[in-house]
C-alpha cells in the first residue's frame, strides 16, 4: 500500500512528456497537411489566374456593308458563287474606310492582320444564315487576331504587351479602344471548336470528345475484364505457385511506367494488328491495358473486405461457389470495385505519355465523330499548347488544365458519392 | 490430477499442440493410442464418424475420432479452447473444404452414405446438414430474403405463396415470427444479436435439413437470448438431429442427451449427458467439468 503514491508521482511526471510528444506529433502532422494544401492551392490559383483569360476573346466593332459586287455574289443558292465569294473583303473594306490614311501595301496588310482569319468564315456563316442581309449595312463585332487579344488584355491590366505589333498597328488599336470599338466577349469558340494553329480560334471540344471516346472504350474493356480476373483469382483460383506468380506480375504491371504501355501499344496494336494510329480505338486499348492492373488490385481488395462469415453463411446454406459469389460477395464488393474503376479511369484521363507513342499527339482540327476518327485527348492537348510559341496559348494551356481538373474532380467526387450511395451499412 | 498444472488454465498454445505428439501426454492421463471411453456407438445413429483425422497443413487438429450422432437427439461437444471440437463439427457438412490446406482422413457417413465420396454432391449435403455459426451472420438483406434464400436456391418453392408459407413456418419454428412479422422486409442485420441468431436458425431450418450443426451459437449472446435459443434447440430436437459445440457446460447439460468431451484433438469420452456431468468415466473429463482447466 505504501508504494502506491510513488507510482502515482511517476505516472504524473511521465504524463508531461507524453503530452508534449503528442503535441509535437500532431503539430508535425498539421504542418505536413498545410504544406501539401498550400502547394496545391498555389498551383490552382496560378492556373486559375492564367486560365480565366481564355474564356473571353477580343472583338472589334466594324461598320460593314454586304455589297454584292464586293462579295462577288448575286444568289446564295448558287454553290459556285458561294465557294468563290470573297468574304474577307467585307471587313477589309470596313477597315479601309475607318482608316483611310493607311495606303501603303505593307501597312494595309498589317491593318488587315488585326482581324482574325476566322472573321471571313464568320461573315460567310452569318450571310448564309440570313440571306436578307445582302446589300445592307450593319455594325459587326469581328474576332480579333491573337496578338491583338494579348495586347488588349495586357493593356486592360495596365501593362500593354507590344512586342508583336508595329507602331502603326498600336495607333489603330488605340483609336479603336478610344472610340470603344474594342471589347472582351465570352469566347464560345474555346468550348465548341477543335484545335487550331491560330490561338484565337483554338478550342478544347475536339480534345474533350477525344478523351470521352477513348475513356469509354477503356472502361468497357478494362472494367469487366478486371472484375472477372479479380473474382477468379480471389474466389476460384487454387492458391499455388502459378497464382502467386500471377499476383506478383499484376502488382508489377501496376507499377510499370505508363510510357511502356505506349510502346507496347505501338508494337502490338499498331504494328502487329495494323490498327490505324491516332484513333480512340488504339488509345482506349492502350489505356485499358494500363488501367487493368489497378482495377484488378482494387477489386481484389474489395472482394477480400467482404466478411468471410457471409461466404460461410451462404456455403452453409448449400449455395454453390458461383451462387455465393454472385448473390453475396459481388453485391457487397461492388462499391469498392466501382471506386477503384473510377480512380483508374481518372488516372487514364490524365495520362499523356502512352498516347504520345501511338500518335494521339497529332495536330487534329476536326472534332472526332467516332471511335475511328483521328483524335487527341485533353492532357495531350495541354502538352501541345504548352509547346506552342504563341503567347496567347499560355492562357489556353491553363484553361485546358482547368477543364481537365474539372473532369478529374467530378470523377473523383462521383467515386466518393457512389461508394456512399451503394455501401450497405447493415 | 495435480499434473494438469503443466497445461495451465485456458487456451492451449501452439506448443501444447506439439506436446500432444511428444512423449509427455501420459503425464496428463492421455496416452498416445487413446481410446475414447464411454458409449461411442448408439442404436439409432444419423451420422457416424470412424477414425477421423483432420490436418491443417502438417498440424494435426483431430486424432482418430470415432463417434455416432443419434437421430433426433442433441449431442453436445465440449472441451477447452483449441481442442478441435469446432473443426470436427465443420467436417460434418464439409465446411472445412473451404479452408486451404485442410485434409481429412477416416470415414464420416450420413445414413450410411460416405460424406467424402466423390459421388456425393457437397451442395446437396449442405442442404441436408445445415449450420448455425458462432457469430450471427445474417445476409445483408431483408429478414424475408434471409429465410427465403435457401428455398430459392434449391428451388423448393413453386410459387410466391409457397415461399411466403415456408418463410412464415421457419420463422415461427425459430420463435421469431411474432417479433418480425411487421418488418419482414427490413434489414436482417437490424435485429438484436439474439434475434439475428434465431433468424440464422430460421434460415437453416427453412430447407428442412436432417441435421443442424451449431457452432457455439450462444457465445455472442446475453443470458436471456441464450435461454431462448436453448428452448428453441429443445423444441427442434424433436424433428432434427442436432450437434452443438459449446463452451458453456450448463448449456450442454440443459440441452443435450449425449455429451462428447474433446481434449487436444482427441475425443476423450462420450456418454449420456447426465452421466458425464455426474459421474464422468475419464479423469480428464472430470477435471474439465469441475473447472480445473478449460
Image: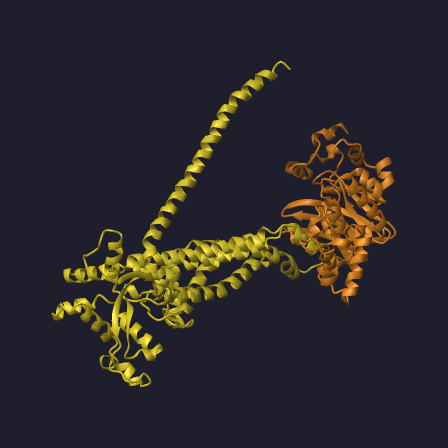
* Colour in which chain A is drawn: yellow
Residue at the location (73% across, 41% down)?
B219
Residue at the location (23% across, 58% down)?
A151
Q: Based on the displayed image, in which of its 4 quarters is residue A39 positioned?
A: top left
Residue A228 in sight from this viewpoint: yes
Q: Nearer the viewer, residue B38 or A411?
A: A411
Residue B117 in sight from this viewpoint: no
Residue A352, percent across and down?
37, 59
Q: Can you name the residue that lies furthest to the top here?
A: A2
Q: Quadrant of the N terminus of chain A?
A: top right
Residue at the location (82% across, 52% down)?
B241
B96 relative position to B238: left or right: left
A415 relative position to B118: left or right: left
Q: Nearer the viewer, residue A163 or A205?
A: A163
Q: Nearer the viewer, residue A369 or B6?
A: A369
Q: Is residue B240 above or below residue B255?
A: below
Q: Is residue A4 above or below residue A322?
A: above
* Colour in which chain B is drawn: orange
Q: Based on the displayed image, in which of its 4 quarters is residue B165 positioned?
A: bottom right
Q: Nearer the viewer, residue A50 or A122?
A: A122
Q: Is residue A233 above or below residue B261?
A: below
Residue B166, percent across and down?
79, 60
Q: Is residue A114 above or below residue B68?
A: below
Amino acid at each position: 500500500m505504501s508504494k502506491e503514491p510513488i507510482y502515482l508521482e511517476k505516472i504524473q511526471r511521465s504524463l508531461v512528456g507524453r503530452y508534449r510528444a503528442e503535441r509535437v506529433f500532431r503539430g508535425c502532422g498539421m504542418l505536413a497537411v498545410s504544406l501539401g494544401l498550400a502547394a496545391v492551392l498555389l498551383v490552382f490559383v496560378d492556373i486559375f489566374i492564367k486560365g480565366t483569360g481564355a474564356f473571353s476573346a477580343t472583338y472589334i466593332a466594324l461598320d460593314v456593308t454586304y455589297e454584292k459586287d464586293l462579295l462577288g455574289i448575286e444568289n446564295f443558292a448558287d454553290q459556285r458563287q458561294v465557294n468563290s465569294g470573297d468574304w474577307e473583303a467585307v471587313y477589309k473594306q470596313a477597315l479601309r474606310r475607318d482608316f483611310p490614311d493607311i495606303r501603303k501595301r505593307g501597312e494595309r496588310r498589317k491593318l488587315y492582320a488585326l482581324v482574325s482569319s476566322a472573321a471571313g468564315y464568320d461573315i460567310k456563316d452569318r450571310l448564309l444564315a440570313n440571306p436578307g442581309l445582302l446589300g445592307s449595312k450593319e455594325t459587326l463585332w469581328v474576332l480579333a487576331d491573337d496578338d491583338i487579344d494579348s495586347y488588349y488584355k495586357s493593356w486592360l491590366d495596365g501593362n500593354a504587351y507590344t512586342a508583336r505589333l508595329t507602331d502603326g498597328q498600336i495607333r489603330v488599336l488605340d483609336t479603336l479602344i478610344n472610340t470603344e470599338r474594342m471589347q472582351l466577349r465570352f469566347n464560345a469558340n474555346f468550348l465548341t471548336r477543335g484545335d487550331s494553329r491560330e490561338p484565337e480560334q483554338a478550342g478544347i471540344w475536339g480534345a474533350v470528345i477525344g478523351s470521352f471516346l477513348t475513356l469509354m472504350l477503356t472502361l468497357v474493356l478494362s472494367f469487366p475484364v478486371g472484375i472477372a480476373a479479380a473474382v477468379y483469382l480471389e474466389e476460384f483460383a487454387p492458391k499455388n505457385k502459378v497464382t502467386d506468380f500471377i499476383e506478383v506480375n499484376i502488382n508489377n504491371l501496376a507499377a510499370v511506367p505508363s510510357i511502356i504501355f505506349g510502346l507496347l501499344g505501338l508494337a502490338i496494336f499498331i504494328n502487329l494488328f495494323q490498327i490505324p494510329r491516332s484513333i480512340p480505338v488504339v488509345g482506349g486499348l492502350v489505356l485499358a491495358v494500363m488501367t487493368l492492373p489497378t482495377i484488378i488490385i482494387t477489386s481484389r481488395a474489395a472482394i477480400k473486405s467482404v466478411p468471410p462469415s457471409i461466404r460461410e453463411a451462404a456455403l452453409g446454406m448449400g449455395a454453390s461457389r458461383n451462387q455465393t459469389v454472385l448473390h453475396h460477395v459481388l453485391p457487397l464488393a461492388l462499391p469498392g470495385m466501382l471506386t477503384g474503376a473510377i480512380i483508374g479511369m481518372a488516372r487514364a484521363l490524365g495520362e499523356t505519355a502512352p498516347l504520345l507513342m501511338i500518335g494521339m499527339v497529332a495536330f487534329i482540327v476536326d472534332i472526332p465523330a467516332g471511335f475511328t476518327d483521328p483524335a487527341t485527348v485533353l492532357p495531350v492537348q495541354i502538352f501541345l499548347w504548352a509547346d506552342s510559341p504563341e503567347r496567347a496559348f499560355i492562357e489556353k494551356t491553363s484553361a485546358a488544365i482547368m477543364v481537365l481538373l474539372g473532369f478529374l474532380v467530378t470523377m473523383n467526387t462521383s467515386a466518393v458519392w457512389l461508394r456512399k450511395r451503394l455501401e450497405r451499412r447493415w | 490430477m495435480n499434473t494438469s498444472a503443466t497445461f495451465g488454465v485456458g487456451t492451449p498454445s501452439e506448443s501444447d499442440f506439439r506436446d500432444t505428439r511428444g512423449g509427455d501426454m501420459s503425464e496428463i492421463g492421455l496416452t498416445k493410442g487413446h481410446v475414447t471411453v464411454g458409449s461411442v456407438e448408439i442404436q439409432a445413429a444419423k451420422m457416424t464418424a470412424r477414425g477421423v483425422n483432420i490436418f491443417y497443413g502438417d498440424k494435426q487438429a483431430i486424432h482418430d475420432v470415432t463417434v455416432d450422432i443419434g437421430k433426433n437427439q442433441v449431442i453436445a461437444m465440449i472441451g477447452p479452447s483449441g481442442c478441435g471440437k469446432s473443426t470436427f463439427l465443420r467436417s460434418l457438412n464439409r465446411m472445412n473444404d473451404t479452408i486451404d490446406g485442410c485434409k481429412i482422413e477416416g470415414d464420416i457417413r450420413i445414413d450410411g452414405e460416405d460424406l467424402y465420396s466423390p459421388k456425393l454432391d457437397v451442395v446437396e449435403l449442405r442442404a441436408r446438414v445445415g449450420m448455425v455459426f458462432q457469430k450471427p451472420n445474417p445476409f445483408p438483406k431483408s429478414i424475408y430474403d434471409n429465410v427465403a434464400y435457401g428455398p430459392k436456391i434449391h428451388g423448393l418453392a413453386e410459387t410466391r405463396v409457397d415461399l411466403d408459407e415456408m418463410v412464415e413456418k421457419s420463422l415461427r419454428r425459430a420463435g421469431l415470427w411474432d417479433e418480425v412479422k411487421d418488418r419482414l422486409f427490413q434489414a436482417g442485420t437490424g435485429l438484436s444479436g439474439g434475434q439475428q441468431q434465431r433468424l440464422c436458425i430460421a434460415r437453416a431450418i427453412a430447407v428442412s435439413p436432417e441435421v443442424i450443426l451449431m457452432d457455439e451459437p450462444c457465445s455472442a449472446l446475453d443470458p436471456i437470448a441464450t435461454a431462448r435459443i436453448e428452448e428453441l434447440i429443445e423444441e427442434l430436437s424433436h424433428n432434427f438431429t442436432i450437434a452443438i459445440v459449446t463452451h458453456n457446460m450448463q448449456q450442454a447439460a440443459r440441452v443435450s442427451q449425449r455429451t462428447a468431451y474433446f481434449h487436444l484433438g482427441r475425443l476423450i469420452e462420450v456418454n449420456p449427458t447426465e452421466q458425464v456431468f455426474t459421474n464422468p468415466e475419464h479423469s480428464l473429463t472430470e477435471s474439465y467439468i469441475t473447472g480445473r482447466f478449460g
